[in-house]
Image (cartoon, grey):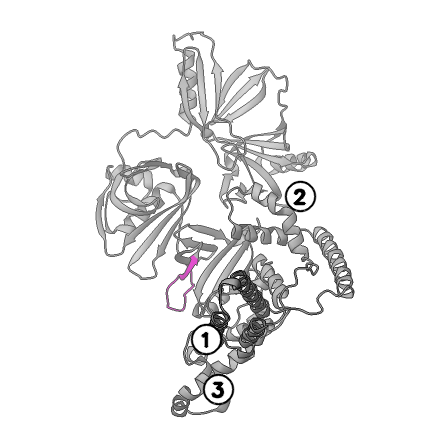
Amino acid sequence: MGDTLEFNDIHTEVKGSWNDGRLRFSKQSVVYKSHKTGKVDSIPAPELSAAQWRRVCVGHGIKLATSTGHVYRYDGFKDTDFEKISAFFKSNYKVELAEKDMCVKGWNWGTAKFTGSLLSFDVNDSPVFEIPLASVSQCATGKNEVTVEFHQNDDAEVSLMEVRFYVPPNTGDDGSDPVEAFAQNVLSKADVIQATGDAVCIFKELQCLTPRGRYDIRIYPTFLHLHGKTFDYKIPYTTVLRLFLLPHKDQRQMFFVISLDPPIKQGQTRYHFLILLFSKDEELSLALNMSEDEVEKRYEGKLSKNMSGPLFEIVSRVMKALVNRKITVPGNFQGHSGSQCITCAYKASSGLLYPLERGFIYVHKPPVHLRFEEISCVNFARGTTTTRSFDFEIETKQNNQYTFSNIEREEYGKLFDFVNAKKLNIKNRGFKEGMKGAEGYSDSDEDQHDAYLERMKEEGKIREEGDGSDESEGDSDESFNPGEEDDDVPEEYDSNASVSDSEADDGDSEEESKKKKPEKKPKKVVKEKKERKPRKEKKVKDPGAPKRPMSAYMLWLNGNRERIKSENPGISVTEISKKAGEMWKQLSKDRKEEWDRKAAEAKKQYEKAMKEYRESGGGAAPVTKEKKKKGGKVEAKKKSGGEKEKKEGGNESFKSKEFISSEESSSESDHDRGSKRKASDDDDEEAASTPASSEEESGSD
């Protein structure tokens, strides 16, 4: 048998929610590490006093009791694991792994036993259920009743709110009330925050970024009390996961970050991080509300009664001693500007990304902490709005994606080398070789499906069928050249953009190009208009032609759009496309092949329908938009002219021949003037003069 035993996918219950992790038995200790939070629980081997093996709802479980009164429960073992675990415990811990059966009679009366931090309800000396007293938030008493309330966990689908115990009115030998005795046993081990005694120290008016505001922080031996103008928070030290001390990029401020699990609550808002902002110049002299002997005995030299120095150092030193956690600071990473962080944006809010020795942390809104062990891969993606920045994408093993955008391209080399040194999986690793500075970005569209791009491509095919769209796409790809200087790449709205292209081709000097600018600019503009004008007058979509077939993705999206809306009420149109793109990416290969077959069938039907449509004479003589409009005007004019003639014809008996001829000649002259004015306004003289001549002929007739 080896020196260690390791088991994956072992579950432990934390305030009503199952957390999975890895359990390791070694000769020195029992270590459990949570996959969700990365928190490590270690039980020294000499402290183990008892061990039980029992059948539970998710296989088999182990219950470990220590000499200090703590109880640990781990579930998820297989039936075949009993023999090797029992032999390991006997040889290394000198503890026998006893088998214990749970009671399944379903009785609701029995005996309540308090064992350390565990309340066990037994029937015939077999446990029915057990309650970890650390999950109890409050305990209330009645006449013959005790009500136990529990902390709520947001990760639990179903939460147990309270349990009521009926205690018979039976006084003990000493005359004590059994109800009060029961309640005191619960409260002695329950996680109930009670501000008893004086605070160790108080920090006044500290600036807090999340939750936002200024708070007085009262430090108690077992919890932290934040007192603000509107809200109060009591944070037990047992909920503190990690402490971070991070320098601001301006080198004049410091962030002190406290990671919490479970988070503090304000209405429906959850704060997983408490972020304090300090100025480096702010000094403080602090005296602890304890005697020197008591400070030395309790904190073993980590604190002294009187301390002075920068405010951020005093606060971090006090928190480190009371919480008993190490403070994480940035490692060896240095950005382009020499700072230990990178300026970027996350969810449209600007902030700072700190590469740490074992993860990344983003400050401040919203704060994000990602450990290397939960990262699946990273990707360097081209910026969507400008070539002067890039995006850094992180994908976790739980298929969550975090995109930090608008990072300056000068930071690319430093960040790539850091990620490469930490041996993280980089999607576009091949683009680094042979590149300088920021030339190694890859387009994020190559790595994941973009629903918006797919829709634009479909619309582009329908409108122009590739007439000129390839040229515009080629130009946009060529414009992305991060390695070039800014002066060599003209901006889109730069007035010298077209001239600079000609300068590069002809090799003229700067002085000569300045002289030629006013001459070349109008020529190019006119030339472009003449070339592009016929394109607008080309084919118009024939309403009678068969509709183009949709791609496999668009067919899938139409079939699942309503389901996405129902699962995400209130989601916007753009968010639907983004969500659909993520779901399509995660779709299995078999499902995608099914939609590919449907798309292929739709394409065959379209080609067949198109062939029949063309054979029947459809689409032979397409009409441009301008001709339709002009034709419509001619018909309207003819109609109005006919109505005029009818009116005149009705009054012919009342007018002389001279009067009629003079009126017709005047109407013709007015119409000639109108047609001339119209011909001068229109670009095409021939199209404008034709209706006028035809109308004159009808009038003369």
Measuring from the top left, give residue 509's x and y in whole percent: 42, 92
- Residue assigned mark 1: 673
The magenta stretch spans which residues?
330-345
Q: Amino acid type of disc 2? A: Met
Q: Amino acid type of disc 1? A: Arg
Q: Is residue 103 visible?
A: yes
Residue in the foreground of this view, choosing between 427 and 315: 427
Mark closer to the observer (3, 1)? 1
Residue at 46%, 58% (x, y): give it.
Answer: 404
- Residue assigned mark 3: 502
Q: Amino acid type of disc 3? A: Ser
Q: Is residue 318 above or below residue 196?
A: below
Mark closer to the observer (3, 2)? 3
Whether the residues at callouts 3 and 2 have beta carbons within 8 Å, the answer is no
Q: Say which element carries label 3.
A: helix
Drawn side of residue 145 relative to residue 111, left or right: left
Residue in the foreground of this view, choosing between 460 and 383: 460
Residue in the foreground of this view, choosing between 222 and 568: 568
Residue at 76%, 56% (x, y): give it.
Answer: 601
- Residue assigned mark 2: 1
